[in-house]
Amino acid sequence: MLAEIITIGDEILIGQIVDTNSAWMARKLNSEGIRVKQISSVSDDRQHILNALAEAKERADIIFITGGLGPTKDDITKQTLAEYFNVKLVLNNDALNNVLSIFKRYNRPLLEVNRKQAEVPENCEIILNNNGTAPGMWFNADGKIYVSMPGVPFEMMYMMEEAVIPKLKQVLKLPVIIHKTILTVGEGESFLAEKIADIENDLPDNIKLAYLPKMGQVRLRLSAYGNGETSLNDDLEAFAARIVDRVGTNVVAQEDTPLEKVILNHMADKGLTLSAAESCTGGYISHLITQHAGSSQVFLGGAVTYSNDLKENILGVKNETLYQFGAVSQETATEMVEGALRQFGSDYAVAITGIAGPGGGTEDKPAGTVWIAVANTNKTVTKKFTFSNKRAQNIERSAIAAFFMLITLLKETEM
Amino acid sequence: MLAEIITIGDEILIGQIVDTNSAWMARKLNSEGIRVKQISSVSDDRQHILNALAEAKERADIIFITGGLGPTKDDITKQTLAEYFNVKLVLNNDALNNVLSIFKRYNRPLLEVNRKQAEVPENCEIILNNNGTAPGMWFNADGKIYVSMPGVPFEMMYMMEEAVIPKLKQVLKLPVIIHKTILTVGEGESFLAEKIADIENDLPDNIKLAYLPKMGQVRLRLSAYGNGETSLNDDLEAFAARIVDRVGTNVVAQEDTPLEKVILNHMADKGLTLSAAESCTGGYISHLITQHAGSSQVFLGGAVTYSNDLKENILGVKNETLYQFGAVSQETATEMVEGALRQFGSDYAVAITGIAGPGGGTEDKPAGTVWIAVANTNKTVTKKFTFSNKRAQNIERSAIAAFFMLITLLKETEM
């Protein structure tokens, strides 16, 4: 079963927003055995939308359309769908009641443009929008399914989860796709490929291997395609086991889990706690950790000590250390991580101090110079990194490097 | 001048990664007067890539292709481009030297697959890759330009900035597009549209207005298309001024700036400092602030006090306050923000305490209950929010709400 996603809106084409909807939808659809054949982003332009629909119909069985359902002039998806299907727009009572109830809830007057949001092409079934005024729409035409949803992420997500996916399961006989991801660290894509070349050659036609590199990590993704054979999962697991065995210590997880979640899961299992002392990462490490539900079981908190004063006051870094060695030094990183352990009372701590850039560097310590320390009550490990002068990249790389160091220390100590 | 972006790779189509490259490229191209007509994500599949190239050629003058240039089996972009242009792959000496120098720098043995990265279709000009082994490629064919680059974001970005954009400027006579963005807060899309309907009706054909809503904010983007008339900018500014005047106090900035950057710029101008005390946002607010170069001029740092102990130890929240009113309360938020001012010595502070969810809620305080406090040395303002039970959304909304409150307090006090 093949799908195509069409996102409508100039904001994507001028790069003002990143299209996160498509990735989310693709992930959902894949896990239900629906393969996304193409994702197309097109402009709020009648002819362009009509062309995109016609092209998608040739490639896919189900066409998902997001965006262009707002109340303003540049939103023309609904009219264009009506034109595509050669039908009229009609007022839908359920959609109107939803609009009315939303305006009542917020006690705001209903404008004519809002009432228009309840008009839909007459050949569609509406999908109620619990989080907004624009209804979703489901069309059956010429043996294809078309689903049009708002571009606002949480409105679309709610519709997909509550209405669209359940309905697709009802009306379609879906094939089976299973993915298995192996997360590796510290080894490049081509070296991994060389290492497991013979295993890759042994893969049957219905199992594919993809290399997904991302800043110091490579995800190896095995995908098995089938029609419900019970052996599919066994086959996949057998190949995964061979790869894990071959790659060895570079394997960090046998699931598609973010690095920091691997740490959280492991530490939660062992009843360990963590704190962070961040300078150049400015809260990013804490954010990566705390974005995960349940992180409070492990993560006590930490400090973002951008200024030297805060390094002294919160973490107890000595004034003479800062003066003698500088804020970006092995000595300061060590005192930061040991200060975090002491002040925050955690079993493990991580500390980062560096020059995120692009400015602020010196000849001795150019932008991108970063000292990272990880520690438990028995051992402190420090390491210096020299990244680039790109701020966002340096913050990201520092976080990944810190997590690597923490995993390594945890492995040594606790595994 | 129209462009199309084709991203190649199954990882986007199964939703394992979000396509941030296209948004970045689109923004760059737009600012140079090149409009992106369509963005298409296709799979690592020969026929599918050939079709996408053929379709793009019908729509666009310049076709940008990213991805599929890695050394592994699933990377087939190069072979497919050679087939598309009906040419052979040949070894390129400059590209080979680049590969050799990278392997020498890291002192690693060169594998056959790495050497193959220096092979390119014989009709291309290569674009040197300073950050990796896969060369970029520039093709001129049938009056169209094709540019193929790696999918690794920083490799692609470097090539675009250093080689591709300069070369495009050299060989093309580019038209002019000017954008002007007005950032508004606290008013919905349809109300804004109603408020400025007559101004929108007055817009000439070559000026477009788009509404870009995003969690409590709406960006109004005016785009003027022209061929170098000197009046283009004046026309755009005149319409912008009318809109700004009409929308009034909901206008926060007259440029496309993130909310927190508006705050940073303003505080830097006034020589003011800021600190943060975060519980449920877990470092996200600090991260949003510190991602901006120069933020250290304003931001001293802060605390991520996930545990109650840290709220007491770092911020000086009273134990009896936590006991009597709970960690998520007006009283705790007040003591957190005042503790931040006192302990961190900043002119302004922001504090957030809440239940990010999805778990952890009670009947009294369901997940999504958030107390936010902002303060300067003369005034503390607190406000309660009731969001949903979606963790990521609650963290994002809390940050936006905190920044709104801070801007409002700054406006009252300093503007």
Image (tube, coloured by chain):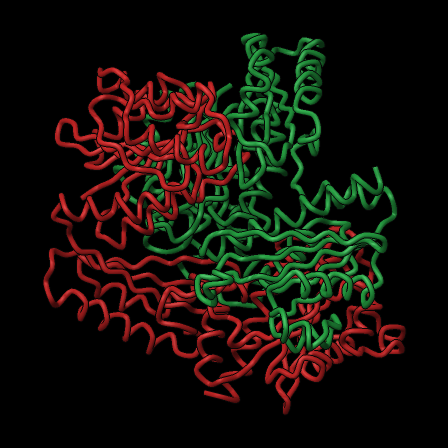
Chain colours: A green, B red
Rendering coords of residue B412 (x, y %):
52, 87
Q: Residue at x 47, y 62 (%)?
A: A357
Q: Residue at x 44, y 28 (%)?
A: B9
Rendering coords of residue B377 (x, y %):
64, 89
Where is B395 relative to B316, above or below? Answer: above
Q: Nearer the viewer, residue B206 or A178?
A: A178
- Image-quadrant location for residue A303: bottom right
Residue B11 is at least partly visible in this image:
yes
Q: Residue at x 54, y 45 (%)?
A: A94
Question: Image quadrant for the C terminus of chain B?
Answer: bottom left
Residue B386 is at least partly visible in this image:
no
Question: Image quadrant for the N terminus of chain B?
Answer: top left
Rendering coords of residue B298 (x, y %):
53, 77
Residue furthest toward the bottom? B378
Count of residue discs: 0
- Image-quadrant location for residue B151: top left
Q: Residue at x 32, y 27 (%)?
A: A54
Where is A123 relative to A286, above or below? Answer: above
Q: Nearer the viewer, residue B209 or B260?
A: B260
Where is A374 relative to A104, above or below? Answer: above
Left or right of B358? Residue B191 is left
Q: Nearer the viewer, residue B175 or B300?
A: B300
- Image-quadrant location for residue B183: bottom left
Rendering coords of residue B234 (x, y %):
17, 71
Where is A140 relative to A228, above or below? Answer: below
